[in-house]
Amino acid sequence: MADNWTSSFVPLVLPVDGRRVTIIRSPSLSRFSLMKSLTELAQYRDLLYTLTVHRIRVRYKQSILGIAWAVVQPVSMMIAATLVFSLIARVPSGDAPYAIFAYVGLLPWNCFSVSVANATGGLVSHSQLITKVYFPREVLPITYVLAALFDFVIASTVLVPLMIYYSVPLTAKVMYAVPIMAVLTLFSSSMALLLSATQVRFRDIGVAMPLLLQLWMFATPILYSLNLVPERLRDVYMLNPLVSVVESFRQAILYATTPDLWMLARSALISILLLLASYVYFKRVEATMADNI
């Protein structure tokens, strides 16, 4: 059950007739309240793991290709992009073949788009679970982010034969993929929390997601190089954290150079601030989530 009271104690557990009743209240904007929510989330890490594994299994259950679908989507997009932007539009890709240029950009983008698209409707699709069982509601959108990371790992295996075919050397710079993907995970989680909580109150978000992701994709240097963006627009353009994620990933994997660490650090800061704001907003919405869902 839920109410609209404001309290720094979330949740409140009361014994009623020998049973434990959890009352979810809106948390106060305090450090204590935030730490308490994060501590509670850590206590539910087994549920987070179980639901993530379940999410992966259900996605590919009773399908002929099974887990290979994690590879089919980015490979299909790479082929289509190569035909359009390499053979027809002839978008420059530097010294790299356009096929692998596009695929390296599509990998982090697909991870982001799949996680956000699925997480947006995650709370609404689990309405019966939310209204009957208590657990930190942020577990649901986070599981979609973790499941998308699993797909990213599977799809990344295609990079090896592509790099061998196009004679692209694999160097130690590939280790930069770890902090790059950490930034992507932070940003994906912030968007997943924000959009899923908003979807509970305004179902327009779910309807608008395909359009939003299409526009977002063209606002990110996935199918074209960052160098093509005019200098006068670069500062505003770089506010999109995905720009540095995609560009840094491409620099480390494809060009074997050190990414722009300042650009990546700025995106990390933006992602952390957005994650904190989204988490606070999510916990505020959580208080009345069962009533609105």
Image (cartoon, rainbow, N blue to C red):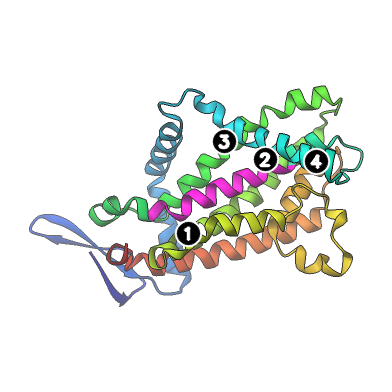
Q: Is residue 136 visible?
A: no
- Few, some or many C-alpha atoms within 10 Å of disc 4 (few <14, some 14-19, many ≥20)? many
Q: Secondary structure at mark 3?
A: helix
Q: Is residue 145 left or right of residue 1?
A: right
Of labels 2 and 1, earlier in sequence is 2
Q: Is residue 39 visible?
A: yes
In three-dimensional space, the C-alpha distance between marks 2 and 1, rounded to whole angstroms, equals 24 Å
Mark 2 lies on residue: 107
Q: Quadrant of residue 107?
A: top right
Q: How many marks?
A: 4
Amino acid at circle 4: Ala
Q: Secondary structure at mark 1?
A: helix
Of labels 2 and 3, earlier in sequence is 2
The relative height of residue 55 versus residue 91 in the rendered view (above or below) is above
Q: Which mark is residue 252?
A: 4
Range shown magenta: 105-123
In three-dimensional space, the C-alpha distance between marks 1 and 4, rounded to whole angstroms, equals 36 Å
The relative height of residue 78 versus residue 2 in the rendered view (above or below) is above
- Few, some or many C-alpha atoms within 10 Å of disc 2 (few <14, some 14-19, many ≥20)? many
In three-dimensional space, the C-alpha distance between marks 3 and 1, rounded to whole angstroms, equals 24 Å
In three-dimensional space, the C-alpha distance between marks 2 and 4, rounded to whole angstroms, equals 13 Å
Report the mark closest to the observer, 2 or 4.
2
Give 5 or 122, whichever is nearer the viewer.
122
Give 127 or 177, whichever is nearer the viewer.
127
